[in-house]
Image (cartoon, rainbow, N blue to C red):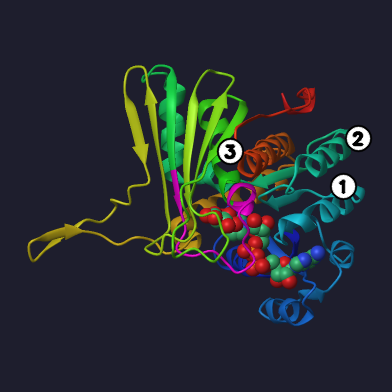
Amino acid sequence: ATLGVAVIGTGRMGADHVRRIHEVISGARVVAVADVDAERAKAVAARVDGCSAHTDPAAALAAADVDAVLIASPGPAHEATLLAAFERDLPVLCEKPLTPDAASALRVLEAELRLGHRRVQVGFMRRYDPEYAKLKALLTTGQLGRPLMLHNRHRNVASPPFFTSSMLISDSVAHEADATRWLLDHEITAVTVLRPAPSANAPDGLRDPQFVVFETDGGALSDVEIFVNCGFGYQVQAEVVCERGTARIGDGHALVTNMAGRWGGTIAQDWTERFETAYDRELQAWVDATRRGEVTGPSVWDGYAAAAVCEAGVRALEDGGRVEVELVGKPALYA
Ligand code: NAD
Ligand code: ISE
């Protein structure tokens, strides 16, 4: 049967996921939406036949025909909706970050453990990006040998007005925390954050860019240039350096033009463009797995580990120096 989805948060990502469910992927329909902004919820619901609009997420979860929940509210609001979904034992796709800090992520993990089965796929969509997937597949073959270093660049055109210096880590570098853990199959054990003089184009007081270094339990280093007011484009690049070779993605060379003595191409301007295919594949994978009664993809453990890494990163940013990541033991549910 078609999966009835409640979408919580109908801002930029939520509204785009509603469109995706209706126009791009198969097997699901949106039956309810909720947003604290009633007008926004109503406007998005009006685009979908038979979709109800709510201001309270709990009311949307209780609406008729809801089989599953997609959470696209801001990170600090995720925990309450996750716990409400667990009470109804509903499958969830939760946008990243699972929650903004380790303590709240751990509360979610403990609640899922009490449920006794996995219910959540976390929205680390890079795992579904064709380029990242190719890099992961190559690393898995072992042809390149042991990974020694991973270099990441993460650039946004401009940050939104509410963005803080710690959000460069907890909201943006959260993606590299997950990508590093997933690509290398290592846990991150310590974080150091270096801070060059901020760009004159960054809003006053924002520490942008930052240079983050992760150490892993497999003895590798992963560095991240995070620069959220670079002005020229949306770029996410990764190069892994291994004992027998290197591999690199994100150069945007899909189309190269030669004209009038120059060569070049265009640069995506935001994540909806760069990761369009990844979001489509992520949602389709969630719907397909849910309809089979399975839960696949990034887990609550992955969301918790990323939150713990980011929390250490925020402390390293504020206090300077190297901060170790503290993780609880990995429960068997996530083995
Ligand atoms: P947004 O501000 O555009 O939208 C958030 C919406 O949630 C707003 O309409 C707001 O009114 C609503 N809201 C706030 N509190 C709420 C609550 N308690 N219950 C219900 N609705 C509430 O933000 P966005 O850019 O769409 O981000 C939403 C989520 O998606 C965040 O978790 C963010 O980190 C994530 N995100 C992921 C990616 C990605 O690449 N995977 C990209 C952007 C954003
Ligand atoms: C945003 O929330 C995302 O998830 C984007 O993928 C990331 O590039 C951006 O920096 C975040 O703020």
Q: Is residue 303 above or below residue 243?
A: below
The answer to whether residue 27 of the structure is visible from this angle is no
How far is disc 2 from disc 1 in space, using C-alphas? 10 Å
Which three-letter amino acid code belongs to the residue tagged 3?
Ala
Mark 3–mark 1 contact, CB under 8 Å?
no
Q: Which residues are magenta?
A: 153-171
Residue 25 is tagged as: none
Mark 2–mark 1 contact, CB under 8 Å?
yes
The quarter of the rendered structure image containing the C terminus is top right
**Residue to which mark 2 is pinned:** 114
Q: Is residue 135 above or below residue 228?
A: above
Q: Would you identify the image quadrant in which residue 41 lies?
A: bottom right
**Residue to which mark 1 is pinned:** 86
Where's residue 199, x and y in %?
Answer: 44, 58
Which tag, 3 or 1, sits closer to the chain's start?
1
Q: Does any atom of ligand 1 lie closer than 8 Å to the CB of label 1? A: no
**Magenta includes 285?**
no
